Every structure is written in structure tokens, then in C-alpha cells.
Amino acid sequence: MSRYVFKSLIGFLLLALALPVTSSAQNKKALQEKKQQLQKEIEFTNQLLSETEQSKKTSLNQLRQIDKQISSREQLIETMEEEISLVEDTIQRLSASIDTLELELDLLKNEYAKMINHAYRNRDDYDRLMFILSSKNFYQAFKRLQYFQQYADYRRSQALRIDQKQALIDRKIKLLTAIKISKEGLLQAKLQERNDLSSQKNKKVEVVNSLKGKEQKLKKDLKQKREAAKQINKAIEKIIAEEIRRARAAAKKAGKSEKGFPMTPEAIALSNSFAENKGKLPWPVAEGVITAQFGEHPHPTLKGVKVQNNGVDISTKKGNMGRAIYKGKVSRVIIIPREGKVVMISHGEYFTVYSYFKEVFVSAGDEVDTKQSLGVLVDDQNENASQMHLEIWKVMNKLNPERWIYKSNDL
């Protein structure tokens, strides 16, 4: 194999090995960020559960917190498995790279050995001198002298390349050893998470069994929640209908179209701005985890019972405050008996609804900014925790808040 072909082949192999590195590094970074966020969620849920368990009373919210932690742990284990797979892939690629480098090193050493052997057989300085002096002309003598110099330079460069190649192999072997150690650490961490997940599932069984003895209370609470949700839903629809009527009356007075939900240029701009921030809106609490999702779901313990959620429920620490997820104008503050106060904010044709306040800091007509505190959340004395219920509407259509707020809260 010629030196040129050999170099080309080695270059191609190294390029092939290097190409996926950037993608692999990006994937690893994304997995690590996801893992860190899940670990934060688990840690925060642990804090909530610790506070909830101080009441010595099992509750539906406690069960939801456990379910959230189980879900987070399962996702964390999946993320760890993906990370381990990436590490194994890195190990394979690094091992292949080392094999390629060792092959190149062997060829360099063989070529160098042949040069040394050749130099040894032709080591007589007198023969070299006679070879130069026997030249037919000065140009030929110069070329022969240049040949000996280039040959000596090439030998030195080959020796240097061998040293550099060996040093590179040594570094890669150290890196490979470190990566293998990190893999072992990931495997141990994954095993610990599996054990914790098993313990959490056992805890869930205990809570579920405890709640089965409270079926009548759960049915009563569910009935109360449904009635409160119905009142909030009715109030929201009434408020939006009033806003539409006022907007149409204003449009008619200005000689403009009265169809749909007429808006001023300012309201249109605010509405468009709200829509452009879909998926990037802050959470309605500074810290928390979603424990009840949007839509219809089976009741956690009551068989055959469905629960309809018009928004999301977020568990947070006792006495925390709720905040606006975007700038807008307070449409109304609604009081729901036994459920606390509700704040409704308009953002053009979009409306955000925040429930479970025991005290609010805003009134109808107030302009609010993004992340502005709206009030203090109700704290359940039986659970030592608070909840925030968030809904997002586009005129009369209910939207899934999880698709609008950040994927994860900065705990």
C-alpha cells in the first residue's frame, strides 16, 4: 500500500469517526439537561410530600404528588438509559479510533525500522562521499547531497510522528478508561433510581388503600370541585360574552365590522404577542409541579369515574403566591365559595384564569405585567401545601396550558 493511499484511508477513517461526535455531544447535553430538570422535579416533589406527610393524613393531592414523582422517576430512568447508550456508543467509537491509530503507528514503526536498517547497511560515510563526487556535474552532485539531507530529515520527522502518535493513543486510552468509569457510575445511579421507584410504587399502594376507606369523602370533594368548576366556567363564559358585546358595540359606533371579536389595534398586537410566546410563557407559580393535567382523565381512586379538567393543577409549597403568565388587563376577580378567589386576565382574544387564591392584590381593570404577583394561594391545613389551577382560553375555546408554558419550571 502506497504512503499516499494509506494516509488517505486513515484520514477517511478518522473523519468518519469524528463526524458523529458533534451530534453525540449535542444529544448528551440535551439528555443531561433533561436529567437535571427531572432530578429537580423529584427533589421538589419530595419536599412537597415531606410537608404533606407531616399532617399524618392521606389525601388525593398526596396521591397525585406520588404519581408525579413516579412519572418523573420513570422518565429519569429512560433518560439515564439513553445516556448510557450514548456512552456505550462513544466507547465503541473511541475503541475503534484507538485501533486505527495503533494500526497507523505499527505501519510507521515498520517503515521507520526499514529506514534504520537501510541506513545501517549503507552507513559508510566514504561510500556516500564517493557517491556524491562521482556525479557527472554539479547539479547532479547537488541533487545527491540534497537527497541525503532530505532522507535524514524524513527519518527525524518519522521519529517525531511516532512519538506524537503514541502520545495521542495514550491520551485516548486514558479518556476511554475515564468514560468506562463514568458508565459504571451511570449504571449504579440507574439501579438506585429503580430501587427508589419501587419504593415509591409501594408507597402509592399504601396511599391508595388508605384512600379506599375515604370513598364517601372523596365523592363529596369531587362533587364540590365539579360544582366550583361549573361556576367558574359559567362566569368565564359570561365575562367573555360581555367583552365581545362591548367590543362589537364599540366597533359599530366606530363604523367598523361587528363580526367575531372586534379588537383595537392595541388588543390585536397584545393578542398576537401572546400567541407568539406559545411554549415560552412562564409558570403561574415560581416553583411547582403539574399534578393534574388538561382534559378528561380517570379518577385516581374512584372506579369508573371520569374527571374533566379545563386547565392544569400545579402543586406548590404552602402559602406561595400566584403570578400572571403574561401582561394584560384584569377582567374580573371572582369569588367561589369554599374554593377561594379567581383572577381572570385578558390578553386580546386570549384569557388566562388563575384559581385558589385566599387573598388577591389586583382588581378588575388593573394592568398587570408578566410574572406580577396576583395574590396568595389557599393553603390546605390538612396537607401543608397549596395549589394553583391555571386555564387558558381563546375567546370561548379552552386550551391546554401545558402547550403554552415552559416545558419545565425553573425550580
Image: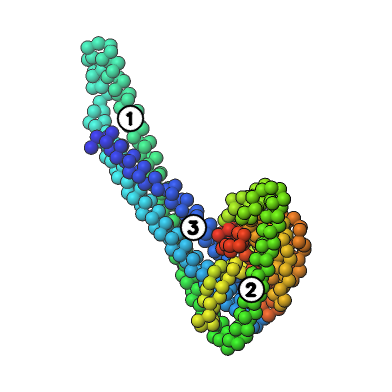
Query: Does 384 sit left or right of 112 as displayed?
Result: right
34 or 80, nearer to the observer: 34
Q: Earlier in the sequence, mark 2 or mark 1?
A: 1
Task: Tell me: 86 left or right of 132.
Answer: right
From mark 2 to mark 1, how far is it between C-alphas? 88 Å
Q: Which mark is residue 31?
A: 3
Please, is residue 24 above or below residue 335 in the view? above
The disc label shown at residue 230, or none: 2
Query: Is residue 285 visible to us here?
Result: no
Q: Which residue is mark 1?
A: 154
Among numbered discs 3 and 2, the one appearing first in the sequence? 3
Crowd class of label 3 (few under 14; some 14 to 19; many from 20; radius 10 Å): some
Q: Amino acid at mark 2?
A: Lys
Name the residue located 43 percent from the left edge and 49 percent from the top edge.
23
Q: Are dots 2 and 1 in contact, CB under 8 Å?
A: no
**Vertically, is 278 above or below 100?**
below
Q: Indicate the quadrant where residue 177 lies.
A: bottom left
- Select label 1 or label 3 by which is in front: 3
Residue at position x 23%, y 14% in the image: 135
Residue type at tag 1 = Tyr
